[in-house]
Every structure is written in C-alpha cells, then in structure tokens.
Image (cartoon, helix red, strand yellow):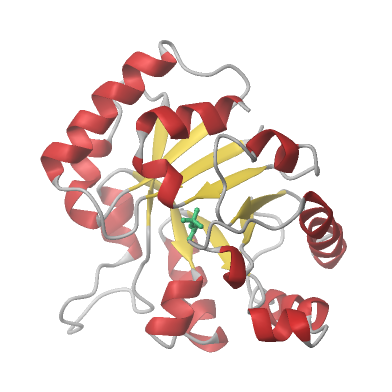
Amino acid sequence: MPLIVANWKMHKTRAEAAAYGAELSGLIGDGIPGRELVLAPTFTALAEARDARGRWALASQNVAAESEGAFTGEVSAKQVADAGCRYAIVGHSERRRIFAEDGPTLARKLARCREASLTPIYCLGETAEERDASLTASTLVRQVDTLDGDPPDLPLVVAYEPIWAIGTGRAATPADAEAARAHLASLLSARRSVRILYGGSVTPENAAALARTGMDGFLVGGASLSAAAFAAIARA
Ligand code: PGA
C-alpha cells in the first residue's frame, strides 16, 4: 500500500495542527482508498494531529538514541509510541547534517524504534557533491549499511531523499528516482517487507510522474504544510 508521509518539520502550533486535521478530514472523507497517510508533526502537536478515526497514523520526526535516563531535551521512542506514533523518522538529512547524526548514532535510534515497536522511516540520499562525483550509488550503500543490525523480518520504510532536492523546488527526475529505487531495492532485497519512498520537493504537480517510477509513496516536506496539497499528492 502506498505510504504518504507529511513531514511538517519545525512548523505548526497545536491550534494549527488541529485546524489542519479538521481540513484534511473534510478533504478525505472516509479516507483515500488504497493509500496509507501519516502525519509527522513536532512532538508538541502529536495529540492535536492524531485522527480519532484512524484515517491517518502518526510519526515522530526523531527519537533519542538512548532508551531512558538523564538526557535533557531528548524524547524517547517509548514516549513517542505512547503518544500515539506508529512510525518514527530516523536519519533525516537535516538531522545528519545540522545535528551531526552519523551511522552509529542512527543505528542506535533504529534499535530504540524496534524496542518500542515503532516502524522506522529511515532516510538516506546523496549530496549534490556526491552526485556530481558519481558517488550516489556508493553513498546509498554506506547509508544502507547502517541497517545491518535492524531485524530483516520486520517491516521497514526507507525514504530516498537526495539532499539537493530537499526544499529546493528541484525534485529528482523520474529517471533519477527510478535508478535510486532500483538500487535500493536490490540492496534491501533480503528484507521481508520494505517500502521505498521518494522525498525532495514533491508537489501536487510532480507527484503523478514520480509515482510512476515504482516508488511506494512519498515523504513530503514543504508541500505537506497545506492539507489540500498533501491530499492532492496522496491522490496522485
Ligand atoms: P521538501 O522536504 O518536500 O520540502 O523538499 C522533504 C523532506 O525533507 O522530507
């Protein structure tokens, strides 16, 4: 089932999240057939973003690498599961780049997700420099290596998000997305259940063409801040 995830990043108050939920509810009625929708709000808006009718699930945008203890400011996987999350985004490029999260740290976060029965949405993708140096394939291999300790029999979501496409208005071409999807599918072929999403400047306008690449859904940032745009992307 295609999975469409709204990554709000550090946007929306609780009131804005509640208004978004009400608008999305009106737009999708009983839900969009054949689509799984997920909202990833900030921690503070998880309760307001939750759908009592279960037409969409919740994801946290991050979890702590530790399970519990003296880690001021961190939020654990167990806590976000308790707050209603089914998924957790791990390894978003903004976490890797701005907060210097490396492979070993992300492997620990993946393990914490599994302990809390959260399905990770593990993000990877190459920088513009890596792409220009023809290092896309080897970058993906290195980033997939982080999944080595993750149980292959549990469902996993992987989001291919080329960094040059995130928030730039310059999405990958369908050909680029298709090549990355095929490479990731072969790297992850030993796993029992994996869905590969595309992320990076997805809009209602380009979603249909990107969907035809065989991607199992989208991780949407900027465009997901509008309930109407998010619903349109989910329908594409
Ligand atoms: P974008 O962000 O859709 O704004 O490019 C995607 C993401 O960062 O997940």
Residue 172 visible in the current orientation: yes
- Relative height, residue 187 to residue 121 (above, below): below
- Relative height, residue 111 to residue 193 (above, below): below
Residue 189 falls left or right of residue 207: right
Q: Quadrant of the C terminus?
A: top right
Residue 156 visible in the current orientation: no
Residue 226, quarter of the rendered image: top left
Percent of width and height locating residue 68: 26, 75
Residue 50 falls left or right of residue 127: left
Q: How many marks?
A: 0
Percent of width and height locating residue 20: 26, 32
Percent of width and height locating residue 213: 80, 44
Tell me the residue at 61%/63% (across/down).
161
Residue 152 falls left or right of residue 108: right
Q: Quadrant of the N terminus?
A: top right
Tell me the residue at 57%/65% (across/down).
123
Percent of width and height locating residue 27: 39, 17
- Relative height, residue 52 to residue 196 (above, below): above
Residue 112, quarter of the rendered image: bottom left
Name the residue furthest top: 30
Name the residue furthest left: 15
- Relative height, residue 19 to residue 148 (above, below): above
Tell me the residue at 37%/84% (across/down).
99
